Amino acid sequence: MSAPTSVAPVVVARGERIGDGLDAVMRIVEVPMATVQRLLGHARMPYVFILPNMLLFTVFVFVPVGLAIAYAFTGGTNLLIWDRPFVGLENFKALLDCGSYLEPSTCRYNLFWTAVHNTWWYTLLNTLGTLFFALVTALVLNRLTRGRGFFRAVFFYPVLLSPVVVGLIWQWFLAREGLLNGFLTDWFDTRIIFLLEVGWSRAWVVYVSIWFHMGFFMLIILAGLQAIPRDIYEAAEIDGTSQWRQFWCLTLPLLLPNLLVVTVLLLIRSVQVFDEAWVLTNGGGPGTANTFIVQFIYQTAFSPDLRLYGLASAASVLMGIALLVLTLSQLWLAKKAEV
Amino acid sequence: MTAISMKDLRKSYGSLEVIHGIDIDVGSGEFVALVGPSGCGKSTLLRMISGLEPISAGQMSFDDQRVNDLSPAQRQIAMVFQSYALYPHMSVRKNLSFGLENLRMDRAEINRRVDAAAKMLAIDGYLDRRPKALSGGQRQRVAIGRAIVRQPRVFLFDEPLSNLDAKLRVQTRSEITKLHKQLKTTMIYVTHDQVEAMTMAQKIVVLNKGKVEQIGRPLDLFERPANLFVAGFIGSPRMNLYPGKVASTGSDGVTLDSAYLGRFLVPGTGIDVQSGDDVIIGLRPSHLKLGPATPGAGGGTMTVEQVESMGHETFVYGRTGQSDELTIVHVPGHFEAETGSSLDFTFNPAFAHLFSSVDGRSLKGARM
Amino acid sequence: MIAFLTRTRHAGRFDLTDWLAWGWAILGTLVVAIPIAWAVISSLKTEAEINSFPPALVPRAAQTITVDGQAKPLSMWVRTMPDGSEQTVALLRRIGLSATVLDPSKPEETFRVPVAELRQLKEFHLQWSNYSEPMKQFNFLRYLWNTVFVTVVATVLTLLLNSMAAFALSKYRFAGRNAMFALILSTMMIPLSVIMVPAFMVIVGLNLADNLWGVILSTVSTPTGVFLLRQYMLTIPDDLIEAARVDAASEFRIYWRIVLPLCAPALAVLAIFSVIWRWNDFLWPLIVLSSPENYTLQIGLSSLQGQFNVQWHYILAMTVVTLLPVTVVFLFLQKYITEGVASSGVK
């Protein structure tokens, strides 16, 4: 809250002179704000303070939410809502028009259903994979008596990188001339163009996502592990409980609420996969093997030759509903975890 | 120098009224203490005076000027908070000058006032320190200094000594009294500690449950409590209370009958009782003496439960008959008694207080 | 052996599970570090090296020599003669399967040898021009400047506006306070990917398309920031604010001189997060910005990759430039960041 007692008086005085300097500058804002306070009275000032934030939220979140729903019921390629004809449920019908939902090629917008299928598989594998690696890593770090801070930092570091950077780093690592192919040539005398083969590229997209985000979830699980009181284990040890049973009967149940929240959070994030996959696969390739829902929305809306804002919004609304269900279940789980 | 008058002041939060119509007049330059148990509304009342808490109904005036809707700054008050509320990120000097800078006062004048106040409070050696680097007593002085530099119309103190240790508390008490004599500014002082109120204030307002119980000079409250509440609150240790009955009334006084104290005559006129009334008899521990009752005086017997000797004085706690409350006797000097032994005590009936057992008001014509 | 699944051990003996734990941690470190290290190493290679296969683990370049009578420096090769002895030669030119070389010690004599007998000599070499060239060639300084501008302005505005809102929400009672707080928190549930189309329309409507301010303004209000600061401000005693009010400070002055300085630790955490968020933003700038002179680093970088002739030596160098600030921030503030994430669950 305040400077430690060791701060030398000279430093305090200097800091205060700087503060006074800033003060003079702030007079520019302060004087009008004081006038506002005189005009409105002190009881209305909180509204003044919260106004800029609420204004931006309204313009950039609340209005777009309303517009997204409105767009979903209009057609044409005009961007401005008042130039767009009302088409009712047409966009939703078009998206959902399918011979068999399991077979994207039988659908009217097969790209959408390809994206849905890709997203579904990605979500499943990414959630399970991240959960596994994050849990094991958290358990390992929780166990380390030395070097925990270092390893925690190392595993968390990729989380802070940008999706573009991650995509490029891995694209280069997996490239024809990349390091991995160098090893493959050395050891097996073969080269695989990973990102141009459907199966390999999908596997690598999931792998890179795990690599990218694992540290974040590991940190949350680690915090949960460290919140488990140690004396519980000591009591179990006195009771002669085996290590296995301690894990299955103590650690796991006590960690479960934490893991559930992490799982839902992972699901929410996975459904929205876009940036790093887009950069890694040069826009969802090979073909449409790594085209996900967000990319479908982005391309449908912003490709110069499509500009189907209504269709994109309808897809957004469908995804928004799915996310809302997931988010509400997360809130519900978080609330339950607290009890 | 400002006189404050409060007329039927009320404060409610929604439908819950916490201050139920308070009338207090504070003379110009007076030192007034607001006392009462915690939750009695004394801090709320102080905050209403300061302008931090809006007034729901009634009128508050400073020198005949209505101030109900003025901000603290416009009322020109200064306040010393219980927690001191020193700005932790500012040096002592800045803490003192901040309020003056807010008023856009001339820099030279600010420095003059800060230096003067610092000198007066002997904090001029710490002006460039942060509050964290100060002791409790020093922080307390800075908080007072911050109020002084403003040269306010009214000083408000909200339990300013409760965070100090006992020794420092006594010392600061006399310093605040000295400060009042020097500045002659109106001061209102909130405390739950009746000793502080008794030793410092010129006038005490006893509050209970959002109502004024009594207003008066310290000794008045001690000697002529208006009701049972004041009687119990003022004085330490508390007054001994016994149930009794009026046996007869006469021109020389009232004869009382008590299961614990026997029959005795309380001299005096204008005692508002009738024969057969139930009353409560109050006796201060210092008015009880150990020893057998002399004729005409009241007295009783107690079984000693505890003896607290402080060397120069001793309090003896004992049980009288089947009474729920212990009788406390003040004995000057050191005194020893075995627990469980029996002791007689006596008293001069002229010092007995009488209260109605119906509504607790004093029956001995106390001044309200 | 499963003991390591359960808890922090007591200090003492070092058993199999410890080996497994350390093995996992070290292996994981390699998995994290190798791709990044590989990108950093590769970013210092010459164009020729980067396209050669199999890749070398250290950046190298052809060794050259200046020979009297030759205008340009010549590359150095080792010639393995049929009898097995080796000779260092400089290559003049190569035609088909034979090459014209000379011995640097006798520059007048040139002779022809089969290419198969030659092996190029390389030396350790860091190609720093990979970093300087794109600055001139691809407008990278412009991207860098745009990103710094967006990051700094958005962070300053985020700190200012979010702290004002948090101040109102934590230190005042007013009608609608809880509703507004709930509304702000609810925006956490609405990801950009759901509203990107209409949000873009709003940007167009405000005439902010292809404008850095369009990127900045929509990211300034963050529910995370308001929440974080509000929680912190709740711990500031109300007495301080009332003392300032008694001291005749205006409400804005209380915010500016009392509350904001006391919030410094929380502001610092939010500032770190905000810088990282804005520096790394991709999808939204991708939607809003269309002309290259407005690109941020991330957009510029991803557009380089889409070009016909992928120049990996430049891309990798710029990737390193892009990840450098975040890395530096992390190195110095690692503790605050990981603790901030662990305690608030935000990223």
Image: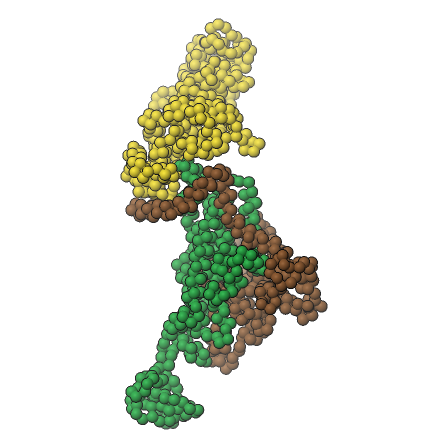
Instruction: Indicate whether C288 appears above or below B25.
Output: below
Note whether residue B134 is visible.
no
Q: Residue furthest top?
A: B251
Q: Residue furthest front?
A: A83
Residue placed most toward the observer, B284 or B205: B205
Q: Residue furthest right?
A: A99
Residue placed most toward the observer, A243 or B123: B123
Picture quadrant of residue C192? bottom right
- Give residue A257's position: percent from left, percent from top: 56, 54
Chain rendered green: C
- Residue at left 49%, top 20%? B228
Residue placed most toward the observer, C215 or A105: C215
Instruction: Indicate whether A270 appears above or below B12.
Output: below
Which of the colour schemes (rainbow, by chain, secondary structure, one colour) is used? by chain
Chain A hue? brown
Instruction: Indicate whether C161 appears above or below A73.
Output: above
- Residue at left 55%, top 44%? C178
- Residue at left 64%, top 59%? A84
Total numbered labels: 0
- Residue at left 60%, top 51%? A332
- Give residue C113's position: percent from left, percent from top: 38, 93
- Give residue B5's position: percent from left, percent from top: 45, 24
- Give residue B117's position: percent from left, percent from top: 31, 34
Note whether residue B77 is visible.
yes
Chain B hue? yellow
